[in-house]
Image (cartoon, rainbow, N blue to C red):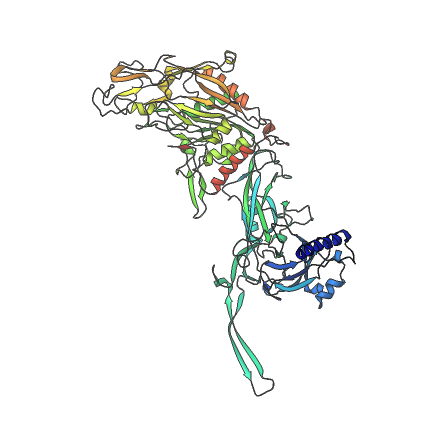
Amino acid sequence: MKRSFVIISALLMGLYFLGGCSKDIKGPPRDNIPPLVDFVNIPVEGARFSSDTAIYWYGTDVDGFIRYFRYAVIESTVVGADPQAYAQNSADSLIPWVVVSVSLEDPGTKQTIKMSADVRDPVRKYIASYIFLQAVDNLGAKSVIVNRLFRKNNHFPDTRISANELKSPYVNAVTSTGVLDGVSLAFSGDDPIDYPRNPPPFEYHWKVFGPYDSLNMVQIRNNYTESVFVDIYGDFYKLHDFYKTVRSLDTTIDTTVVPPDTTIDTTFNYILVDTLRTGNPYGNWGRMLKVDSLPPGLNHLVEESYNPLNGSFWVTSTSANIYDVFKGYPADTTRQEYFLVWAQCRDDSKVPDPVPPFTFISVIDPKFERDVMLYDMTRYGGTSDFNYPAYTSLKNTTVKDIYGRFINAWKPGSFDTLNILKKDSIQISQIPVIWGIIDYPKWKCTQDYYAAGAPKTAEAPAFKLRDVLKHKIIILVKDSPSRLMNITSTEGLAVIEGLSAGMSAWVMARSPFVSDVQSISPVRTAAPTTYRQFFGIDQVVTTGWVNLIKYFCTGTPEQCPFGLLAQIRIEDFIAAIPEKASLESQYPTLRTDTTLLGTRYYWNPGYGILACPYRCSDSSIIIGALPEVGYVEKVAAAEPLYLYHSLHGNDQPRIDPGCDGVWVGHTANFEGAVTAVRYIEPSAGLFRTSHFCFSMLPFDSTSAQTVVNTSLDWLSVQPYIGAGKMAPMAPHGSFNELRQTLRDLQEQQRKGLLPASMSGE
């Protein structure tokens, strides 16, 4: 009973107190306690750095949380002797605070802080700077400002310029809206002492001067550059100067006096800088351009870096594209001249490279002043070859002679067949310097005609980029079933750059992407990506004609129905039929002329596995058709022009005995397949191209001349090279894919990865 009374009393007392307490907090309001902040132990007060270093701190707030930290870096010469007084007496708005936000993911207690170095003597002198630090809590209360002193010196950075070698010229572009990148440059910096790894972003100042001829370039090299030796402190030494180094220190202490007197005797070595080689411990050699000393006659500034945000010439971009570099220097014909590129980087302490590099580049200004360039990739005759265009005397100018007449009939006097070029040399290697010879006289080359066999070395292209850009149209002929047509080559790149500048191209090629097919059945070959993008061809189908001629069977008679050493002849192309009847007036039916087949093409006489006679022993023609013409599968935007017409029509493939033990027939039905197309760049009509699986050689001159006239008229519609000069306004289209393809090829060329010739085995 007593126990129950105690419990009930306790409950009643509790209810009494609960009922009598107010819900409001009484008493004076509690003040917000400011947060605390301080630096961690490392790096210690007065620490010395040669690069921007991560600084750590910590902060606490007992009655809330820290919303952000802020810090300021101020040189000691500004702060004065009492940093705490400086912080207290300076207006908050005059202190260059940097805010560091705090979040759950980032406590904001670490920053890599930029400090200044002496740009005049950055290695020997340390600049002292105070870091002021403060924390601000969620209610806006600020901690006491703390500070710590650090010192920083700096070493000089090195600058590098990435640009084409002189042997790989740029193509001048008027604006940035086309495929061409103009003069594309790249810059980089290095600061190996301060930043052995992961250097910070550099700033760059660059200039481009020009144009110059070769004499101007030599004049600048000889008179406005000099070799200098720069030691680790940034001091300059010219040739024949002496560099002073400490050899020994002798210390003498006189203890007879109070305090003791200390004398230090220093002995120096004097080294002639001319004797210092690369890798010495004292500094580095460099070639310095006297960029501010160029006389008015050479001080042709094309463009200089500029930062619109602060009005200075220091920029953070590591690349630049310069357009219309010949502005103010007009010309009517294509020219190739030189330009000077100079660049200087500075590091995160604003210390610049003391010996900025420079380099010369070459740029072509295309004017397209001539009409048609003809490149002959045909292989002519020979006992190991099968079917190559040539007269009966194996004359190696068949393509030049016949096409020259076609072109001059289209536009009289436009194609030069007479003025034979002199022998030429071309640099094919930079280090060591190697030159290749191009024997133009042997191949009867002119300013409008070039032959694949002209270079004496496979490392030299038959023509240069400048040769292409003098013309409005380039025709490429490969009228032979072997020898590849490699668009991914130095010559191919020149064609692609020409198209990117607004030129046109017409390719006539049998078996363009395979050579001596190791198959006795048709082979489907994908066109290279570059070729698909610029010519509208997706795939090419070839017959395998060469391998059937070399048919060799080692089995039993049942396994070898054509014999052990049979020759199987499957040439069957006898005509190209217009894809539409409405095209007949412009693209008439082309029928092979058996007389021209016998005279313009080399047929290996005799019989057997390596023979390819044109006639039987009774003088009758064995077949009278052209082999290995093939057909294409086009992209959607390409327009079909001609269809394949076979000797066998739509007959099923079959092989039958012919004369003198030769078997004739066909292994596939190509009848009606597309064998010629034309293509307009779909985005803006930047260029026009055409691809034929055959040349004009086996057809009568009247029909062939009509096709040439129609094709050259169509290819001459070139809105962006108006009247043979760069148009004032470049096309506006979506060229990302084409531009990237061109850049990839140019990068391969810079790395020396492209073969020289389009004509491969």
- Identified at 46% across, 26% down, the residue is 538
Report whether 29 appears left or right of 72. right
Report which quarter residue 597 is drawn in.
Answer: top left
Looking at the rendered structure, the number of numbered marks drawn on it comes to: 0
Q: Nearer the viewer, residue 602 or 553?
A: 553
Say if 257 sits above or below 688 in the image.
below
Q: Nearer the viewer, residue 221 or 423?
A: 221
Extreme-bottom residue of the structure: 256
Image quadrant containing the C terminus: top left
Report which quarter residue 551 is drawn in.
Answer: top left
Residue 631 visible in the snapshot = yes
* Residue 511 image position (x, y, % from top left): 40, 25
Residue 97 visible in the snapshot = no
* Residue 589 image position (x, y, % from top left): 46, 13
Report whether 537 appears left or right of 102. left
* Residue 737 image position (x, y, % from top left): 54, 33
Q: Nearer the viewer, residue 59 or 291?
A: 59
Image quadrant containing the N terminus: bottom right
Extreme-left residue of the structure: 556
- Identified at 42% across, 41% down, the residue is 436
Say if 55 sits above or below 733 in the image.
below
Report which quarter residue 47 is drawn in.
Answer: bottom right
* Residue 377 image position (x, y, % from top left): 42, 29
Report whether 554 appears left or right of 241. left
